[in-house]
Image (cartoon, rainbow, N blue to C red):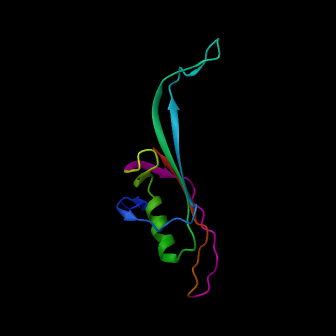
Amino acid sequence: MTDDIIIDGVTMPTPALSGLTIKKEKIWSNNTGRVANGDMVGDLIAIKYTLEITWPMLSRADTAKIDAAISPAFFNVTFTDPGSNSRITKRCYSNTPSYPVYSYVDGVKTYKGVGATLIGK
């Protein structure tokens, strides 16, 4: 089984070491809250995934690949779910990505620490 991150059918560059954090956010109903005795009540209506990704040194081509993949309003992301250890695909959108420039010298990887957060729709 591959652990690659795939966006709309395109395999992304491998994230940096410790460069991928997957969060599973519980979405609760409007009636959720604490009651008089302090117990929590409410209904869990969904679990949404967030992927925080940082990449190592990247070429201009790899950076452009990431940018093209996360630029649409929404896109499909395939990744390994840490809870089930199986591949899943979720519809996501991206926050504002960052593109730290390392160097513009010819032959040198151009970007270091490119990052984006992919958020479940």
Point out residue 79 in the picture as x, y percentages from the top left corner. 42, 55
Left or right of 15, for residue 98: right
Q: Residue furthest top?
A: 36
What's drawn in magenta, residue-wise?
Answer: 88-106
Q: Nearer the viewer, residue 87 or 45?
A: 87
54 vs 108: above or below: above
Image quarter for residue 40? top right
Quadrant of the image containing the N terminus: bottom left
66 vs 30: above or below: below
48 vs 94: above or below: above
Q: Residue furthest bottom?
A: 106
Point out residue 94 in the picture as x, y percentages from the top left corner. 51, 53
Identify the main secondary structure in magenta.
loop
Point out residue 108 in the picture as x, y percentages from the top left corner. 58, 84
Image quarter for residue 105? bottom right
Give the residue at x 45% y 49%. 92
Instruction: Indicate yes or no whether the magenta region holds residue 92.
Output: yes
Point out residue 120 in the picture as x, y percentages from the top left corner. 47, 45
Image quarter for residue 115? bottom right
87 vs 113: above or below: above
Q: Total number of numbered labels?
A: 0
Left or right of 34, for residue 65: left
Give the residue at x 49% y 65%. 67
Give the residue at x 38% y 62%. 2
Instruction: Indicate yes or no whether the magenta region holds residue 21.
Output: no
Quadrant of the image containing the C terminus: top left
